[in-house]
Amino acid sequence: MSKDSLAMLQSARSFLFVPGDRPERFSKAQTSGADVVILDLEDAVSARNKDSALLAVTSWLSGTGQAVVRIERDQELASLRGIPGLIGVMVPKSENPDHVSRVHQTLGCPVLALIESASGVVAAHSLASVPGVARLAFGELDFAADIAAQPNQRAMLLARSSLVLASRAQGLPGPLDGVTPKFDDDSALTQDLHAAIELGMSGKLLIHPRQVAVTHHVFRPSDHEVAWAHRIVKSISEGGAVVKVDSAMVDAPVLRRAQAILGRLASDARALVNHREAHAGGSLAEEDK
């Protein structure tokens, strides 16, 4: 497993889906500013286009393209094995740790385990512990359908928090939140992002390039947050275990929060460097309207 690919996937904030049967969009997605492109062979592709989508994906990744691939069928693994542009694989409807492990062993690349069912949420700790799993991801629309609930913040709270806890317990970065279907509603996207960050999620699945800039802006700590975090860290280092900053007592938990903010800032910087290195010479482009 490439350490570079693993580091890229673990620091990335934005993961942009592109239908596998739309090869004219692949390069546009790669230069959209998204940290990671996911070429989708599952839900975004109709049954009659599955084979042609796999051919388009493998052809592009055998050239200059770099992406994660969301697989649907295990038969696709043989076609993807050894392709230079494959930086990771997304396993949909992840429920069985043994299956996820077999996918990783077959391809040798990092795995994003997409959890979309009650069984998947229950198995989240086991899935997060599988060697090769880079992150957990949440598919809230399928999960809501599975449990016959509305895909709103209250109904999805337990599942999201379960993925956060499982990721933390197994030493993984915060999980990826699911898509915001209204791709032209920046307000809805911003609300979803803030809710995800409050729970401890650290990345977002996207369905349109216009969602990338908003996602990066919200995940980036504000100047106020960064200045506060620096004051906390400096005060603790100079004043001992417990100090007073901005009229409030600061102890170890507050220090950890400050360090987490600075960690988000560092992760944001790493993701930007990774994107620039992976797509050197590219220019920003918008998806077809």
Image (cartoon, helix red, strand yellow):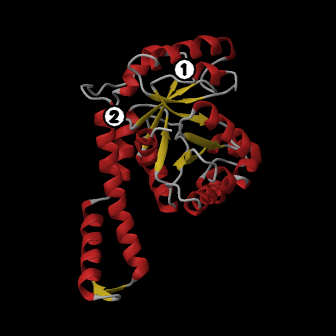
From the viewer's perspective, tell me whether residue 66 is left or right of residue 175: left
Q: Say whether disc 1 or disc 2 marks the residue closer to the N-terminus.
A: 1
Placement of the C terminus among the 4 image quadrants: top left
SS for callout 1: loop
Residue 127 position within the rendered picture, expressed as x and y whole percent measured from the top left: 66, 50
Residue 5 versus residue 10 in the image, above or below: above
Residue tagged 1: 20
Give how far apart the Cα atoms at labels 1 and 2 are: 19 Å
From the viewer's perspective, tell me whether residue 186 is left or right of residue 269: right
The answer to which quarter of the image holds residue 253 is bottom left
In this view of the protein, which residue sits in the foreground, 124 or 200? Answer: 124
From the viewer's perspective, tell me whether residue 138 is left or right of residue 231: right
Q: Which mark is residue 33?
A: 2
Residue 107 position within the rendered picture, expressed as x and y whole percent measured from the top left: 59, 31
From the viewer's perspective, tell me whether residue 32 is left or right of residue 192: left
SS for callout 2: loop
Residue 116 position within the rendered picture, expressed as x and y whole percent measured from the top left: 67, 43
Q: Amino acid at mark 1?
A: Gly
